[in-house]
Every structure is written in structure tokens, then in C-alpha cells.
Amino acid sequence: MEPAIAVDGLVKRYRGRTVVDGLSLTVAAGTVLALVGPNGAGKTTTVECVEGFRVPDAGRVRVLGCDPRRDRDAVVARMGVMLQEGGAYQAASPREMVRLYASFHIAPADPDDLLERLGLAAVATARYRTLSGGQKQRLNLALALVGRPEVAILDEPTAGMDPQVRRDTWRLLDGLRDDGATVLLTTHAMDEAEHLADRVAVIDAGRLVAAGTPAELAAAAGGAVVVVTTPARVDAAALAAAVGAPVEQAGTGRLVVRTGAAAIPRVTAFFADHGLPLHGVSAGALSLEDAYLRLLDRNRGPA
């Protein structure tokens, strides 16, 4: 089956600077792909080429088998797009905007139901210019989804949302996939990518670093780890020597030992021998965030 989105050898330059450099990726129909990477990695430029808003300098982009620029009318009718900067009228209300966008489609979602699900019912008649940043973000998402798109392209869809609305939005996007839609989203939140995405593509400096399921990325980045939580200041080099495996500081009070569960007795013995408090020690796979950071570090090489 042909993928819903196919990007092959995409190149995009601005004033002689290459921001997307031979990028290739696919999104299977009815799945969610999260595109992740640091600021300036080329994520937004990539999705703008997929949306047909930018012309690639080289390479090929197909959405539902069509060129998103040459076959614009055919693609737009089947695609929902959420931009970082929305295009709502400043004097319009959320209800007016969502109803307007619904009128462009043959079988749209119910505008009032969508506003309710995105936590916008209380401000449905307010003017766009009076909305908070998070409310504007939710309205932009509603405008992208009201047409029941076959393909939804969402640029940082939950940025600025409070935790409860963010979780509600995740459920909405889970339902979108369950209904058979294909979703390409960008995000800086690894927990969001881990929850929503069937596959994750990591890009850096416009190039693909790795792609796969969160579990596959964890395996590619190093697989099994032992996670240690402690309030003490620990000499990571000394712990690494005692355990016989690399040790990384992963935030305040958290150490990641790059080895499997068999090393747990050596870890606990180190803490006991040095009189250090140990709040927790557990074995498992790398989190997506740890795998992401390790893959980036590996891609960039020694500083």
C-alpha cells in the first residue's frame, strides 16, 4: 500500500543555507509519525513542504499520492493543517471561525462539539484577539480538524496548553487515528511523542538521524539501562568504575547506568559502601527522551 505521506530526498535552502538536506521519510496510512529535533533542525520547513506551502529545491513530496503543490485542490480537500502561526481573523469568535471552516467541507465534524472537546466552549463567542495563547492554539487545532481530514499535519499542536487540556487533546488525536486518519506532527515534548506516535523520526541539521517506534529508538540508542534516583551528589565516574558501565547524569537526583538488570547489586553495593542514600533503582529500557538525547549526541560526535 502506498504511504499517505512520502518524502524522498527533500532539500530546501534559504539564501544559500541548507536547512533540509536530503531528508526521506514515510508515514503509513492510519498512523501517527512524530517529527522531533532541536530548534532549527528543519522540522517546520519539512512540514511546510509537505503542506505545499514551500517549494522544495530538490526531492519529491507526495501526499495521498499527489503533489501537494501541483495537485493543490485535490490535496487541500483531504488535508487538515495546523500552523505555528494561525490565520484566524482578529475580530471573529472561535464559533464563527470553526463554523466557517466547517462550511468548506462536505461532512465536517460538529463545530460546537469540537469546541467543547478542546475546552473552548466558554470562550466560543469571545473575539480571537482576546484569547490567551493556549486558547488560540486550541482554536488553530480545531480549524485543522473540523473537516475530518484524511491527513492532518500539526506543528507543535499542544504548545502552551495546560496539562488537562493537553491530555484531552491527546485523546482527541488518538481518536483521529482510530478513525483511520494519518497524522504528521512536530513536537518538543518527548512524552507527547511517546504517547501519540506509532513511529518517531529524529532529525538534526536537516538530516534524518533515526526513525522507528519508541522501543526501536531506545534499542538503537543503547537498549537496557538501570535508573538510579538519589538526593546525594554522586561521583558518576566512580560509580561507572564500580559498575563497569557508563553512567550519565539525567537531571537532578537521577543517574542512568547504561547496562542491564544484572548490574543492580553492584549499584546498590556502591551506595552502601559510600554511605550514600538511595531512593530508588530500577531496570528497564531507555525513555524516548533519553534515547533522543543520546542519538543526537552520537550524531554530532565529540565536541
Image (tube, grey):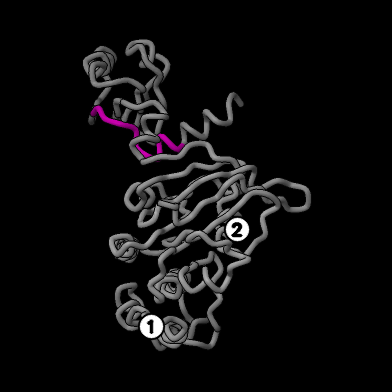
Give amino acid for label 1.
Val
The residue carrying pointer 1 sits among few (fewer than 14), some (14 to 19) or many (20 or more) residues within 10 Å by Cα, namely some
Residues 270 and 108: in front is 108
Q: Earlier in the sequence, mark 1 or mark 2?
A: 2
Question: At which x and y percent is residue 193?
Answer: 38, 49
Question: Could you say which quadrant of the image residue 152 lies in?
Answer: bottom left
Question: Could you say which quadrant of the image residue 171 lies in?
Answer: bottom left
Residue at the disc numbered 2? 49
- Is residue 156 left or right of 120 when viewed as pictured? right
- Residue at left 62%, top 41%? 205
- Residue 217 vs 257, above or below: the answer is below
- Distance, label 1 to label 2, CA atoms, is 33 Å
The residue carrying pointer 2 sits among few (fewer than 14), some (14 to 19) or many (20 or more) residues within 10 Å by Cα, namely many
Q: Is residue 126 visible?
A: no
- Residue 246 vs 182, above or below: the answer is above
Give amino acid for label 2.
Cys
The boundaries of the magenta stretch are 282-292
Residue at the disc numbered 1? 123
Residues 26 and 257: in front is 26
